[in-house]
């Protein structure tokens, strides 16, 4: 039986790119998603703490312990980000949000699909790259002869440029940003691979433009957050010196806003840990620094969910079976 045509009875019309762009702009609603914000902030804080512990272990030449702590940091960042993504996907689909602990549980059970699907697609890219390299090897004069070799090379130049360029474009704007939302929607590994390959084959330009809009929106949020941090941090540092009487230069009190830890040195070389107020300023500034990183991250993840759902709805309109219909959460 043939698949229903777009616009057939029982299927909604495919969303236009303009409608999809409107859904991308709704990614700003992620800034009001308290559970996802707290979960992603806790993930960044835990991963940062584990990385600091790994750095300290490596400094003591405890190589094995440092490697374990670094691996734990990556694991926490991976599963914590996926749990926050599940909460954002619930919001994007208009579903009642699940509990944060349920999101962590679901992430532990499903996030491995992301690694497997990306590995499969990367293997495909490696095979395609190997085929291109093999064709270039055949174009050598010593292999194909002084006439056939240059002719084959002349044909391979435009073919190689287009093929490699499209492959990199597909990885950057389709596979990397949309593989995770596919997992969060409940797709299996094969469904993820099929969906992403379909988008690469039929909607690459639209998806690339939409993901560019998501990146610009997240960058704008990051720029505004940076302005708030810089302007507010400078004012608070001056107040700390003038009103509280902290005997440290304002530049050193602002060190936490740039991600420096308690063991860092200030701008003029004095250890911040020599002052209790200075240590407290670094801790508070570190919280602000993590928050400034989380806000654009939330917007980007929510925007990626919006792009994936818009393209998935297009498959519904075309009579296909999208991942979120055929697989339960």
Image: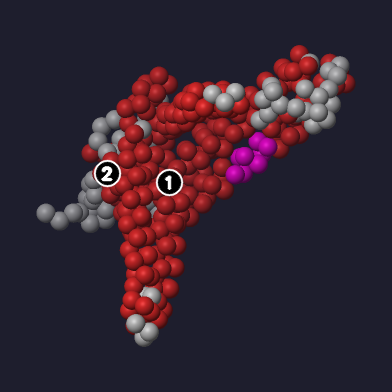
Observer-nearest of 159 and 72: 72
Residue sitting nearer the eye, 182 or 31: 182
Q: Say which of marks 2 and 1 sits in front.
A: 1
Q: Residue at x 53, y 36 (%)?
A: 297
When the figure is inspected, residue 262 is found, relative to residue 218, above or below; the finding is above
Q: Where is residue 293 in the image (x, y as percent from the top left)?
A: 59, 34
Mark 1 neighbour class, 10 Å CA radius: few under 14, some 14 to 19, many 20 or more: few
In the picture of the structure, the residue carrying the numbered disc 2 is 191
Q: Can residue 236 be seen at all in this image of the molecule? A: no
Q: In the structure shown, which secondary structural element does the residue marked by tag 2 occupy?
A: helix
Residue 103, x across and y down, in percent: 39, 24
Q: In this view, does 70 lie above or below 1?
A: above
Dominant secondary structure, magenta: helix
216 lies left or right of 255: left
Q: What sort of colour scheme is used for the picture?
A: secondary structure
Q: Which residue is disc 1 drawn over?
A: 176
Where is residue 228 shown, x and y percent of the image? 70, 34
The crowd level at tag 2 (other Cα within 10 Å; few <14, some 14-19, many 20+) is: many
Which image quarter is the C terminus in? top left
Query: Is 191 situated left or right of 283 in this image?
Result: left
- Name of the residue lying farthest toward the left: 1
Q: Which of marks 2 and 1 is nearer the N terminus?
A: 1
212 displayed left or right of 119: right
Q: Is disc 1 placed on a helix, strand or loop?
A: helix
Q: Residue at x 52, y 27 (%)?
A: 63
Position of the N terminus by quadrant? bottom left
Q: Residue at horizontal 65%, vertical 41%?
A: 223
Q: Say if the magenta span includes residue 189.
A: no
Magenta stretch?
Answer: 219-226
């Amino acid at each position: 039986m043939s698949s229903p045509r777009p616009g057939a009875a029982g299927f909604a019309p495919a969303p236009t790119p303009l409608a999809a762009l409107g859904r991308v702009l709704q990614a700003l609603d992620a800034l009001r998603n308290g559970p996802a914000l707290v979960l992603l902030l806790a993930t960044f804080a835990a991963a940062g703490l584990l990385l600091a512990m790994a750095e300290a272990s490596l400094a003591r030449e405890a190589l094995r312990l440092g490697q374990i702590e670094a691996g734990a940091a990556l694991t926490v960042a991976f599963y914590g980000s996926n749990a926050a993504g599940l909460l954002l996907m619930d919001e994007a689909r208009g579903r009642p949000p699940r509990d944060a602990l349920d999101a962590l549980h679901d992430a532990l059970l499903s996030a491995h699909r992301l690694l497997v699907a990306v590995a499969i697609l990367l293997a495909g890219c490696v095979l395609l790259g190997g085929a291109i390299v093999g064709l270039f090897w055949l174009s050598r004069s010593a292999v194909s002869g002084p006439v056939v070799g240059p002719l084959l090379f002349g044909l391979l130049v435009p073919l190689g440029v287009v093929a490699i360029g499209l492959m990199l474009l597909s990885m950057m704007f389709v596979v990397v940003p949309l593989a995770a939302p596919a997992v969060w929607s409940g797709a299996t590994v094969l469904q993820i691979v099929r969906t992403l390959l379909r988008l690469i084959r039929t909607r690459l330009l639209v998806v690339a433009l939409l993901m560019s809009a998501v990146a610009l929106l997240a960058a704008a949020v990051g720029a505004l957050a940076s302005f708030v941090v810089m302007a507010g941090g400078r004012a608070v540092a001056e107040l700390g010196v003038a009103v509280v009487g902290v005997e440290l230069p304002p530049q050193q009190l602002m060190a936490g806003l740039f991600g420096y830890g308690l063991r860092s040195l200030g701008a003029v070389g004095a250890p911040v840990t020599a002052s209790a107020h200075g240590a407290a300023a670094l801790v508070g500034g570190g919280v602000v620094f993590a928050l400034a990183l989380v806000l654009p991250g939330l917007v980007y993840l929510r925007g990626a969910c919006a792009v994936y759902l818009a393209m998935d709805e297009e498959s519904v309109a075309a009579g296909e079976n999208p991942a979120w219909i055929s697989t339960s959460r």
